Amino acid sequence: MIDLNTLSPREAAYIAHNSYFTLKDWVKGEPSAGMEKTSTVKRMVVGNGIGSGVKGGDTNTSLRSTDLKGASLNTVFRGETAGLSTGFGYVLSFRRNGLNQVIIASRGTRVEHSLADGLADLHAAITSFGGYGQVHAGFANAFASIVPNLARQETRIRDADIVHCVGHSLGGAISTLVAAHYAGARGAGVKLYTFGSPRVGAHVTPQAFESLIGKDNIYRVSHDLDPVAMVGPYPYSHVNGLASDANNMMLRSPTAKLIGVANHDMRRYVESMSDAARDLSWQDVRGFSAEVVHDNAVLARWLLRSVDNPSVFTTRLVEGLSVILKAFAHFLQMQSVTSAIISGMTAIDLFAAALSRGIDRYAAANPQLLAGLQVAAVWARVAVVGMKFTIAVIKAIMTRMMDVIKPLMMEAIAKVGAGNPLPLMIAGATAITGHVIA
Amino acid sequence: MPRPVLTPTPIAASTFRCLTRPRPRAGEHWLRVATCALAATLLLGCEPAQSTSSSTDTMFGLFKSKSPSSVDPSVGAPLVREPAFPAGAATPPAAAYPQVDRMSLDALPPAGVLSSAVDGKSPAEAWVAPSKPDALALVNVFEPKRRCELWLVDRKDGKRLATPVPLQLDANQQKWSACSAQEVLSLPGGKLLVAMRYRVPNPVDALFLLDATGVARKFGLIQPDWPAGLPSRFLDNLQLTPDAVLAVYRTDSVRLGAERYVNRFDHLVLFSPRHPTGLEVAQIGIDDGNVRDWHFARGKLWLHTSDDRGDAPRTFDWSLDLSHVL
């Protein structure tokens, strides 16, 4: 049964994809700082979808080929990141199923920023957001920059029966804040669709957002080996981040076996959400997600194997990793962290959470865990003994894992052709672990 | 199996490649041969274009093409670089064999009745090829999960499915979580060329040749035509003669940067009464460009290609004489 009050997977994926055309010259494949002309955005979003780099025919993500073909582009809005004001998204309205519906689309981050400006954001602090909890300051700043522009559409957004917030990558993070903002202002009727979004909120904030928007109204799609969806680590977490959440739709990555930047491309998400035989339903997507193994040890193995050609020590560590992670999970359960939350964590989260809760004292009294950590210590060349042994070993393992994720994440968001690298505005790992992405 | 190639060594290939550049005048011929031979000897290739499968490593290996084009020996002619693509291409001839019809089924097979009204809501859809003695129906079933079935259509009642044909697409197909035919091309002899998407559980695309026996040939994994944008296209075809069609599919995607991909190889496959299971007449490597336009006239195939990897696309025009294989 088609739910006309919810964007279909194809509609949502197309919107997340075509929102990039708000960035100046994205349509030419040569993005630059600035905002694209409204007429061009309109052509790419609801028109013929043909850009200068695109072959003729209906060969793009224009909504003309969907049920939203009659939608009206109301505005293209700016946003500010890293001190630069650029085209950031658009507002679209349409009527379906007898209801007035509005789409607020936000694009991801790309080549328009300078490396220097962006690096400053990497160290941005956690900040409070609308009384709902703590979020990453870089995302909050970007959100704050688009609010005045969205205010011009306030009446339309306020009076709509349903508001759909859509985005990929950074756009997914901003859309999460946009959805929370309007869910708080309106009280109901807000839906959120994200693809490859990083984590936005820390501690209990994601749960607060879920209560505000409604878990059933949050459609979070990720690839299991998308490096951007893995950051920032604990205490950040995803909305609908539990493995048991029906709308936590983690799909098998296109590359299938390796963490890689291709798994972050919106084009790849469109592929994952496509079937030319017939459009997928969200139920179809949930079905594909159900086949993906949610095991925080799986990612850890991939990360560690990616570090080098596995040495004997690496192989032994990887083999013993399940024991270590199970012990950590057991420890967290003793600390009243539910197994559902633990299953939604990556290995890095698990390590960070355990560190923050005093795993070192637990390890000292657990010979089996200590033995596993000693294997890891040899692999990581940790010479520390005594009270700080456990902490040093865990940090060493995390550092290796983060060393794999960091360049991939940077590459995933940083390059367009020969463009300069740029950062994602993510505060990196936590102050607890001292792993700040830089 | 490695493809036989026209030229056996890198040097010979490069020399040959130079000779296939815009044709020299008669008086300049030997001078150009000597120049090309010298340059080829020094650099092992003036520019990647002509086929070679040699893996000879030298200190000049960096100059070698990693994506060599090749032409099947049975074609009996090389891929020739041309100065321009011919303007005003003639309309391709109509196919002399029946084309597939996309139809809906009002119920799951075998009960469903075929109808030409396709509204995207029926529990199953079919591509029906009115081949003889039995029409083939490739059926996409959408409930309870997506799967693909092959049926023979009832000879007496052309609206009903009669006999299932076991589809043996892959040794591990029982592990697929979903499968559906994405694009179907009707071929001479009642065969179907099918771009299939299945999930393992990540989406995988593969190309198959189907006939009344089930699978006649598996071409392997394929990629969408990345530079052509979305929605993804997997197959293009050019009718050469009323009973011969050329199909192109792509393999080996290369990621250039965020959201930007090209394919390393375009495969041109000829289907005709002489080549009922397909003859790959040429494989075009990305160094010679991805095929963006094509045209057939007087036994010769013309290609316009583009290599989009650099800041500015490099375009090429080629010809390939197919008269020996038609």
Image (cartoon, helix red, strand yellow):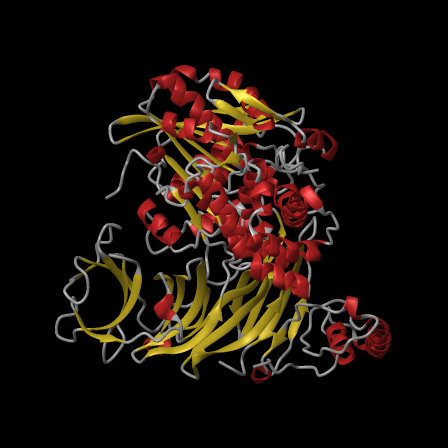
Location of residue A230 in the rendering, given as x and y in whole percent from the top left corner: 55, 43
Q: Nearer the viewer, residue A436 or B116?
A: A436
Residue drawn where x is 61% and y is 70% of the image? B319
Q: Residue A84, image x and y in percent? A: 66, 25
Q: Is residue A410 above or below residue A368?
A: above
Residue B286 appears left or right of B134: right
Q: For residue B99, what is the image quadrant?
A: bottom left
Q: Is residue B10 above or below residue B147?
A: below
What residue do we see at 75% from left, 67% from top? B47
Can residue B129 be seen in this snapshot?
A: no
| Depth check, front residue: A36 or A1 | A1
**Closer to the camera in the image, A274 or A327:** A327
Residue B88 left/right relative to A402: left
Could you tell me residue A329's position as x and y percent? 48, 46
Tell me if A292 is positioned left or right of A350 in this view.
Answer: left
In which quadrant of the rendered image does the N terminus of chain B lie?
bottom right
Q: Quadrant of residue A155?
A: top left
The x and y percentages for residue A261 are 59, 50
Q: Quadrant of residue B252?
A: bottom right
Could you tell me how many numbered marks the image carries?
A: 0
Outermost residue, front side: A365
Toward the viewer: A176 or B41?
A176
- Give the residue drawn at x 47%, y 52%: A295
> Is residue A127 shown to the viewer in this render?
yes
